[in-house]
Structures are given as C-alpha cells and as structure tokens.
Image (spheres, rainbow, N blue to C red):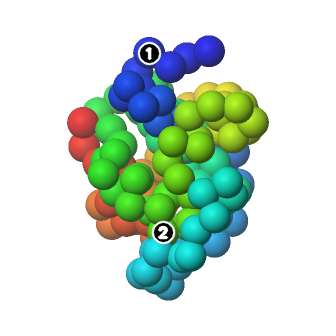
Amino acid sequence: MILHALPSFALPLLVPALLTLGLGTAAAAEGPAPADKAVVSNDAVKLAGLVRFVAESCPGTKPDYARFREVVERLGTDLAALSHGEPLIRSATYTQAYQKDPEASCRRAQESFGPNGTVVPGLIGPG
C-alpha cells in the first residue's frame, strides 16, 4: 500500500466523483453534525482518496491537512476512522481510480478543491 507520503495519522477520486461529492458550500458551511464516531461518511472516504492521490501524484500541489480534518469532522467522521480497516481500503480504491489518468485528475482536483475550488475551496493548494 502507498502510505509513505502520508502524515503519521495515515491521511488518506474517481474523476466523475469530483462533481458528485455533494460537498458544496452549504455542506462545508454547516457546523459539525452530531457525530456517531463509528459512522464514516462516504464523502469523507472519497476526500481521503483524493487527498492521498494529490499528495502522491500532483506535482506542485499539496493537500491542506488542517482543512481536510475540518471538512471530515463537519461530515461527522472521526479522522482516525479513515486510517484503518474498510474505510482505508475504500479510499484507496478512489486513489487508484484517479491514478488511471493523473494529469486529468490533478486538473479536476485543482478546479474543484484548489484555492478557488467549486466543491471544497482550499482543500488543496500549491506545494
């Protein structure tokens, strides 16, 4: 598994999934949901796959891990839950899917999650 580029807490995009995450500004602006820490949001899993992909495959770009933590928590997911078991395996499948066309995936990730992103602005930035 490719965890060497991730921080010690193992942070973890199918290209079409970029537009179907459902994380528009309304979702990002909401406060933390009452979270059952055993529940792992599918959107959080997708974001974990994206963050891992960007860290490993997008030159000149890096994830903002503080912003990632914030978004994951607002989705009602404990960040630690993404670092093991079934959520980690699922997020890795997203990472692998994005790696099939890294140039297009990096471009779309920047458009959707970069400083002026349309889905979660500021999730990724210059590296």
- Amino acid at pointer 2: Arg
> Which numbered tag is attached to residue 71?
none
Q: Which residue is labeled 1 in the image?
A: 4
Q: How far across and how far down the image is residue 101, in percent?
A: 63, 32
Residue 120 appears left or right of 60: right
- Quadrant of the image occupied by residue 85: top right
Q: Nearer the viewer, residue 74 or 29?
A: 74
Asked whether residue 24 appears in the rendered view, the answer is no
Q: How far across and how far down the image is residue 81, in percent?
A: 59, 43
- Amino acid at pointer 1: His
Q: How far across and how far down the image is residue 77, in percent?
A: 57, 58
* Quarter in which the N terminus is drawn: top right
Q: CA distance from mark 1 to mark 2?
A: 27 Å
- At x 34%, y 45%, the residue is 65
Q: How far across and how far down the image is residue 95, in percent?
A: 62, 34
Q: Residues within 10 Å of mark 1 (few under 14, many from 20)?
A: few
Q: Which residue is labeled 2 in the image?
A: 74
Residue 85 appears left or right of 29: right
Q: Could you tell me if the residues under marks 1 and 2 are in contact, i.e. CB atoms within 8 Å? A: no
Is disc 2 placed on a helix, strand or loop? helix
Q: Nearer the viewer, residue 39 or 57?
A: 39
Q: Nearer the viewer, residue 48 or 57?
A: 48
Looking at the image, tell me whether mark 1 or mark 2 is earlier in sequence order.
1
- At x 48%, y 69%, the residue is 74
